[in-house]
């Protein structure tokens, strides 16, 4: 089985689906000739031609608007937003049109598409190349939100997303793009949406994380183990609809939970997760649920590694929660 | 010279008074300790009461044939001579502390019994402490007295999981002394509290609020050397037993059952009842009830029949108030309907069964059952029953000996309706037959009265027209 990084795994999934389904169309800034700023779409235009892999003008609203039109007419567009920080010009198209087409057409026009976009910090990108805007889209009914943490899941989740009838926002953690390598099967397979994965079983405290922060959570869990705290780390993989059953089963076991995400704390996805846990596992809680997140500030360039909820900030949260 | 008042001691078993049969002494007599003073007849037995002290009789209270109350003064002594004990006369309202010998006495007077509902916890912690001191048994109980801890402001600090455990164990968190960080009650605190052997102050079971220090039903259960179960040697690392806390609802049930069988004189009367006509009436009315959203069960008819019979035999709807030694005839008819739940037996109460229509009785029984199984019963749903019906269902057996829901005096066990041969007009025909197992407290209800009550219920179940006409 070949070793791949996440860039290669996503590229592989896109190639597979372009081959398998003639309705699949890629569009975005610099994705064709250049192969994308992160080279995720490398060589795909060469292989499938400029009608299937389309370089677009620098207009996110236009990219998503055009993709919606394609979807309504039966294509399966896969637009790329070069950085998720740039998704806001397309915000109206996504939340007002894309998310609602299936609903307002009574299911006649599902507007099936996967919006791929790199997410998160840790690459010295500054405040316009580092943000994590997942909560805006989780908040909007009609959208699915996925964020893989490793190459295997990236390919499997992308193939599952491409075959899902609903619009999916597919957030690719750019810090992991080339940092993580894993065995990725050749050919077709899917990782089902809405299935979280317990990546490190434990007894004392549940840690919820996704994307690049999963590695920080695992690192913190390993350090906590040396202090006698046995953490159960869960990779959510699909953020929405979230696999609440796996989360609740774990929290009922441990009675304690720490949520880790890069996005600012206030109204971040961690808030929703903890609210759900309070609703469904309140009587099992042994300690107040804790969030370890980015700060309620713009994403800083110079203090990037202080802003991110890295292992050094997760570890005390694990220990304090376990010993509460 | 000092005076000593000797009071009629509590002779036990709920005896509150005795009739003076004969005095063995006269005023002015000098008596020795243990010398017979007087014969007193109670409703159980004649007792000769001996002198607690040496001294001269100063005054006798009560002539032969007169009735004297327990704890009223029987004899006054003049204590002469240096060896005499100091005066023990206490202010009349001081905590009662009988210095008398009273070999038959069983400690101090009980002001109430747990489960009687007469006791409410409204006193301040200081008053509670005083009360528990006053109620301290003269002999130490095998069970340690409860800790009088009370959380400040009545708001114990605990995590949700600990609160859940407290609820499961029927422990009032406010009574548990916290040892956790920031003054929190921890699960270990709860386990320590539950494992102490004294009954936790329960909030779930009806009228089971207990005051620390007052001997509880639990204490009564364990007021002897506790039996311990030895753990057999494990072989091959395989556990041969599992130990779970005997606590919460299970312990509460145990206390109530033990209190009932140790107190009431159970007498069980079993008779069968041909309910062929009742079954037909029910079949006829069922669709109409269903149209109104109500499942009409035989139990609803039985409840109504029980109410009619209770009105004719009010003693079956009575209870003994042990604190005042009165029979309390209740003129309201709240029927406990025993229900089995995953957690164990509970008895929700069908309130004012006499004032409800048959339909309404059926509806309310259904609600109580549903809420009981869902764990949604409110405290008021569990309180105030005057008579209890236990539906023994498909696995009720031939007959049963139900245990009275103390302090009620009777409980009706209802068995499954089965087809059986019955003789009607000289012919053997297939009839719908049900057995009733009625347990009653023979202390209060004589055998023929209990039987007549059972036959009254049977009359109505046999003739549903009469039931519908009269209820």
Image (cartoon, coloured by chain):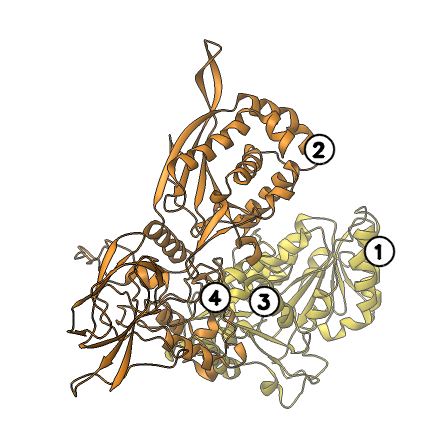
User: x, y percentage for residue A141?
Assistant: 74, 60
The kind of secondary structure element at disc 2 is helix
Q: Mark 3 or mark 1, which has the lower sequence index?
A: 1
Same chain letter for marks 4 and 1: no
Q: Mark 2 or mark 4, which has the lower sequence index?
A: 4
Position above or below: B405 against B104 = above
Residue designated by label 2: B291
Q: Is residue A132 left or right of residue B105?
A: right
Q: Nearer the viewer, mark 2 or mark 4?
A: 4
In the drawing, what numbered circle is on residue B119? 4
Q: Colour of chain B?
A: orange
Q: Residue at x 70, y 79 (%)?
A: A129
Q: Residues within 10 Å of mark 1 (few under 14, many from 20)?
A: some
Q: Is residue B349 left or right of residue B85?
A: right
Nearest the eye: B361 or B33: B33
Q: Colour of chain A?
A: yellow
- For the view shown, which residue lies furthest in the top direction? B427
Residue designated by label 3: A278
User: x, y percentage for residue A159?
Assistant: 63, 55
Q: Nearer the viewer, mark 3 or mark 4?
A: 4
Mark 2 and mark 3 residues within 8 Å of each other at the beta carbon: no
Q: Chain of mark 4?
A: B
Q: Residues within 10 Å of mark 3 (few under 14, many from 20)?
A: some
Q: CA distance from mark 4 to mark 1?
A: 76 Å
Q: Nearer the viewer, mark 4 or mark 1?
A: 4
Q: Residue at x 34, y 65 (%)?
A: B70
Residue designated by label 1: A69
């Amino acid at each position: 089985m070949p070793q791949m990084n996440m860039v290669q795994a996503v590229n592989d999934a896109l190639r597979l689906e372009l081959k398998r389904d003639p309705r699949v169309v890629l569009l975005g800034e610099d994705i064709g000739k250049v192969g994308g700023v992160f080279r995720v779409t490398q060589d795909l235009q060469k292989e499938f031609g400029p009608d299937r892999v389309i370089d677009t003008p620098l207009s996110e609203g236009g990219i998503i608007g055009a993709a919606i039109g394609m979807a309504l007419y039966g294509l399966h567009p896969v637009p790329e937003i070069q950085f998720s920080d740039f998704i806001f010009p397309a915000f109206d198209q996504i939340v007002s049109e894309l998310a609602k087409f299936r609903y307002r057409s009574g299911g006649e026009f599902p507007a099936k598409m996967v919006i791929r976009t790199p997410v998160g910090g840790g690459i010295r990108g500054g405040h316009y190349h580092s943000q994590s805007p997942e909560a805006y889209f989780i908040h909007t009914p009609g959208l699915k939100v996925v964020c893989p943490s490793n190459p295997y899941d990236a390919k499997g989740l992308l193939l599952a997303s491409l075959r899902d009838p609903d619009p999916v926002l597919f957030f690719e953690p750019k810090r992991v793009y080339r940092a993580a390598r894993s065995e990725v099967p050749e050919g077709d397979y899917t990782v089902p949406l809405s299935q979280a994965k317990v990546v490190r079983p434990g007894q004392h405290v549940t840690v919820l994380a996704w994307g690049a922060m999963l590695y920080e959570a695992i690192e913190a869990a390993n350090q906590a183990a040396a202090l006698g705290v046995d953490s159960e780390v869960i990779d959510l993989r699909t953020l929405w609809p979230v696999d609440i059953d796996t989360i609740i089963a774990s929290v009922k076991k441990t009675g304690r939970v720490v949520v880790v995400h890069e996005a600012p704390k206030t109204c971040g996805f961690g808030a929703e997760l903890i609210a759900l846990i309070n609703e469904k596992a309140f009587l099992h809680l042994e300690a107040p649920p804790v969030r370890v997140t980015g700060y309620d500030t713009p994403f800083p360039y110079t203090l990037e590694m202080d802003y991110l909820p890295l292992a050094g900030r997760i570890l005390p949260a694990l220990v304090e929660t376990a010993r509460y | 010279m000092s005076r000593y008042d000797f009071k009629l001691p509590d002779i036990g078993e709920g005896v509150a008074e005795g009739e003076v049969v004969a005095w063995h002494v006269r005023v002015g007599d000098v008596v020795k300790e243990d010398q017979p003073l007087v014969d007193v007849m109670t409703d159980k037995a004649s007792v000769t009461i001996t002198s607690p002290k040496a001294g001269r009789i100063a005054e006798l209270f009560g002539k032969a044939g007169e009735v004297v109350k327990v704890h009223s003064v029987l004899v006054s002594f003049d204590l002469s001579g240096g060896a005499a004990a100091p005066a023990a006369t206490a202010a009349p309202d001081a905590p009662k502390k009988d210095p008398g010998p009273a070999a038959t006495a069983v400690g101090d007077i009980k002001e109430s019994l747990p489960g009687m509902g007469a006791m409410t916890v409204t006193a301040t912690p200081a008053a509670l402490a005083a009360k528990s001191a006053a109620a301290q048994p003269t002999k130490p109980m095998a069970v340690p007295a409860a800790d009088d801890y009370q959380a400040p402001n009545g708001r114990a600090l605990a995590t949700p999981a600990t609160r859940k455990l407290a609820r499961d164990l029927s422990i009032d968190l406010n009574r548990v002394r916290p040892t956790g960080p920031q003054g929190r009650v921890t699960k270990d605190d709860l386990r320590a509290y539950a494992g102490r052997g004294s009954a936790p102050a329960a909030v779930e079971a009806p009228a089971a609020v207990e005051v620390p220090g007052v001997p509880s039903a639990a204490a009564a259960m364990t007021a002897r050397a506790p039996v311990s179960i030895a753990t057999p040697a494990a072989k091959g690392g395989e556990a041969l037993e599992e130990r779970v806390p005997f606590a919460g609802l299970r312990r509460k049930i145990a206390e109530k059952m033990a209190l009932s069988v140790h107190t009431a004189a159970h007498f069980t009367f079993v008779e069968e009842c041909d309910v062929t006509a009742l079954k037909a009436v029910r079949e006829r009315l069922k669709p109409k009830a269903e149209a109104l959203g109500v499942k009409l069960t035989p139990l609803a008819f039985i409840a109504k029949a029980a109410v009619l019979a209770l009105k004719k035999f009010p003693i079956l709807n009575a209870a003994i108030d042990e604190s005042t030694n009165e029979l309390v005839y209740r003129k309201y008819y709240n029927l406990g309907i025993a229900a089995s739940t995953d957690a164990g037996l509970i008895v929700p109460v069908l309130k004012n069964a006499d004032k409800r229509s048959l339909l309404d009785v059926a509806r309310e029984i259904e609600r109580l059952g549903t809420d009981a199984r869902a764990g949604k019963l409110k405290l008021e749903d569990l309180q105030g029953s005057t008579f209890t019906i236990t539906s023994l269902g498909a696995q009720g057996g031939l007959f049963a000996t139900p245990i009275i829901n103390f302090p009620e005096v009777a409980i009706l066990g209802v068995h499954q309706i089965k087809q059986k041969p019955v003789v009607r007009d000289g012919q053997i025909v297939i009839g719908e037959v049900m057995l009733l197992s009625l347990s009653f407290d023979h202390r209060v209800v004589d055998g023929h009265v209990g039987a007549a009550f059972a036959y009254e219920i049977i009359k109505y179940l046999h003739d549903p027209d009469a039931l519908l006409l009269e209820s």
